Amino acid sequence: MTRLLAALLGRLPIGWLQLTHNRGRMIAALAGVAFANVLVLVQLGILGALNGTVAIAYAPFEADIFISSSDANTLTDGSPLSRRVLFRALSDPQVEAAAPLYLANVDWTRHDGSIATMIVYGLPVEAQAFAGSFIREALPSLAMPDTALIDRGTRAADSEALSRVSPEAPLQFEVNGRTITATGNFDLGGSFSADGSLAVSDQTFLRLFPSRISGTPSHILVDVSDGAESTAVVARLAERLSPEPVKVRTLETAKADDLTYQLTQRPTGVIFGFSVAMAVVIGLVIVYQVLSTDVADHLSEYATFKAMGYPHRFFLGIVLEESVVLGLIGFLPGLIVAVGLYQFVAGLTGLPIEMTIARATSVFSGTILACAASGTFAARRLRAADPAELF
């Protein structure tokens, strides 16, 4: 390592030699950097899982335009709409089709007594064009009363047993006092607000939730004609529906608004965002303390160099060398531990948490920059130091 650094730096790697001279301090410093990396990577992983679950929640349906109640901040909250909004939207010449979407949560008490919270998606069986690709073909089969498609990725469920559910091998279970027969399955997975999902027809949805009526869907899905600009249709529909308490957006905009709200307004997003910031501060403090102590322990050596006429940038280079080496070596064990924690959390919760190259690269770059910043700060005391006072 010494030869490699000497070749790269074109001089004796004084910073590396200072670090390795005290092995105990070096190990403690590397452990601190690795710990800070683990904190940042895990918090970013959970935030990434939140992003993933928001996107996944919209996967069971497709549309160009998404009409929601004005108080709907996420997919599953907000007041129901009036079905007349659907007919008013259809009056636009560039609207090709529209369909109601019904959403609600239900508790499924399984045979072992455990309870799974399921998001129930209700779509008219004739609205295949609005169904997600993984349920589109099976949607007409849900015309039979009290039939459903079940999420084989439901948290803490027997995924192998659920993956075998089919019309030939249906699964019967009870929710909200009704016996539901699952005749197929899809893979969606759990989220922060639910353990799994069910896809049913609008009629089965209304049987499961007798307090809801067909005239009050949760959202309205709209497709525009070929060649029409969705944004232009959104603007016209927003003006046409201005007397109604609704907001009209493209589906992609609705997803982005949902994610922004959950990251900035919901406690989960705010807490994990704050945790990332705290992890960065912890890493900065750890590296600064190590480098500041090292500078203090070698003041006499630095004084000798300064008395010999070496400029401040020489000392800054040594300290930065130490900081970058700490960042480089400390990142790898942090990354390995974080990947292991990702796998553990994903297996335990079913959340879509996984390490990405972009995340690892960004955290690595941030680690080097944070270490360099700490090193620069730690080297400040050498700039104004008087060699005569340091001896």
Image (cartoon, grey):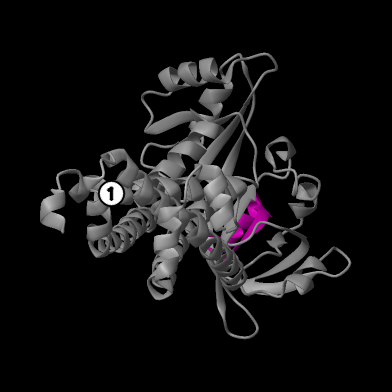
Report whether 84 appears left or right of 226: left
Front-most of 43 and 137?
43
Percent from the top left, x then y, of residue 19? 41, 63
Front-most of 222 and 324?
324
Q: Give the range drawn in magenta.
A: 191-208
Tell me what residue is drawn at x 78 percent, y 72 percent: 160
Quadrant housing the C terminus: bottom left
Instruction: Indicate the secondary structure of the residue bearing disc 1.
Output: helix
**Is residue 177 at all visible to an observer of this figure?**
no
Q: Quadrant of residue 229?
A: top right
Percent from the top left, x then y, of residue 363? 48, 50
Quadrant housing the N terminus: bottom right
Q: Residue furthest front?
A: 308
Q: Name the residue under label 1.
A: 305
Classed neighbour count for the residue bearing mark 1: other residues with Cα under 10 Å, few (<14), some (14–19), many (≥20)? some
Front-most of 372 and 53?
372
Report whether 314 appears left or right of 252: left
Q: Which residue lies furthest to the left in this view?
A: 389
Report whether 316 appears left or right of 127: left
Percent from the top left, x then y, of residue 83? 51, 36
Percent from the top left, x then y, of residue 259? 45, 44
